[in-house]
Amino acid sequence: MTKSEEGGGRRHYLDHASTSPCRPQAIEAMLPWLSAPGDPARAHLEGQAARVAVELARQQVAAFLGARPREVVFTSGGTEAAVTATWMATERGDHVVVPAIEHSCVREASARHRVSLVGVDRQGRVDPDDVMAAVEPSTSLVHLQLANHEVGTLQPVTEVVARCRERSVLTHVDACAAAGHVPVDFRALGADLLSVSAHKLGGPPGVGALCVRRGLRLRSLLVGGDQERARRAGHENVPAIVGLGTVAEHLCGPALAEEAGDARRRIQRVVAAASDGQLGVGTEVLGHPEARLPHLVCLSLAGVEAEPVVLGLDQAGLAVHSGSSCSSEALVPSPVFEAMGIDASRTLRLSLGWSSADADVDALLGALPVVLTRLMALGA
């Protein structure tokens, strides 16, 4: 319980795109495995019980992502999955194509190799022709996120993957921001590699998955053991894997569409308020107007720095995110906005999740105009 809640006030969490609270069904499924012994690699009864739990979770995650169970490799999270994908693919060559709006783990893992950076339009969307123009005979990998983590823009992944396949170039799709909010179908996308993170969709932190296309034989990043069919060494995090599998199974049902519909309806209230001038300052809704994630909206604020807005909303009991440098451990603004030609210091990202309610948006629409008006009066 937070101090605000202890004092009778309710916190309103609108930063699910950063991390979402763990769902109750995942916690319940994990609890027995927090105290259960057993290495999934061992032949004794305890080890075999752990192996069954891991393989059941693998089937659940595979069904959720439209993959075969043998294509799913469990990792410590989306970052490890994306870095591993880069390491695996660059065995074939040292040139990588990276859109400028990719997550920092993708950009920094690729920066160890020779990189061609691809720009985006003001809506944060890449042009497939620009991506393919950057491909060279020595290109080993093309990255393209399924959806942008800052502004929510969906990318033309299927087209890019198909064109790369024609040129025998491997593709990695970062689906961390999208999984759990829009359908993800690894088989239909046709990608070679796809990464997801559990904590973005209501699973436990510290676990994710990398889908590796059937028949693809690539080097492992983590070596020293035969876990995950020798594709990722190290003792499997059985409790977290079970938690991820439970969430994946839940989202294979009607929950994903229902949650997405609720999020879209609530986010549209924010979009309408921003468009109608109800927030007290000029605002612009960033990202693609239609091809976008349902649970996220990013606003550009006219004449106001976002950091004091974040702090003001926090004092009012609301947790939100900004792309400015002070909002994270990084000392530079998000490069996503630089690539889009947007001033990151004036951006405010609001994102909902499985635990969000209408009251959270009510609180935001009540507090945000007050905070903005006060800051405008102070000249902030």
Image (spheres, rainbow, N blue to C red):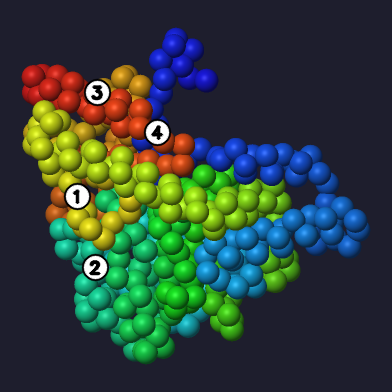
> Quadrant location of residue 95?
bottom left
For discs 2 and 4, the disc positioned in front in the rendered view = 4
The quadrant of the image that shows the C terminus is top left
Residue 52 appears left or right of 365: right
Determine the secondary structure under disc 1. Answer: strand
Amino acid type of the residue tagged 2 in the rendering: Val
Name the residue beneath numbered marker 4: 357
Name the residue beneath numbered marker 2: 126
Q: Nearer the viewer, residue 62 or 84?
A: 62
Q: CB atoms at circles 2 and 3 under 8 Å apart?
A: no
At horizontal 24% and vertical 29% (from top left) the residue drawn is 365
Looking at the image, tell me whether mark 3 or mark 4 is earlier in sequence order: 4
Name the residue beneath numbered marker 1: 286
Q: Position of residue 183 (x, y in %)?
A: 43, 62
The image's mark for residue 234 is: none
**Residue 218, above or below 100:** below
Amino acid type of the residue tagged 1 in the rendering: Leu
Determine the secondary structure under disc 2. Answer: loop
Looking at the image, tell me whether mark 2 or mark 3 is earlier in sequence order: 2
Name the residue beneath numbered marker 3: 367
Q: CA distance from mark 2 to mark 4?
A: 33 Å
Amino acid type of the residue tagged 3 in the rendering: Ala
Q: CA distance from mark 1 to mark 3?
A: 21 Å
For discs 2 and 1, the disc positioned in front in the rendered view = 1
Q: Residues within 10 Å of mark 1 (few under 14, many from 20)?
A: many
Residue 227 appears left or right of 168: right
Looking at the image, tell me whether mark 2 or mark 1 is earlier in sequence order: 2
Q: Residues within 10 Å of mark 3 (few under 14, many from 20)?
A: some
Residue 201 appears left or right of 12: right
Q: Position of residue 194 (x, y in %)?
A: 48, 67
Looking at the image, tell me whether mark 4 or mark 1 is earlier in sequence order: 1
Total numbered labels:
4
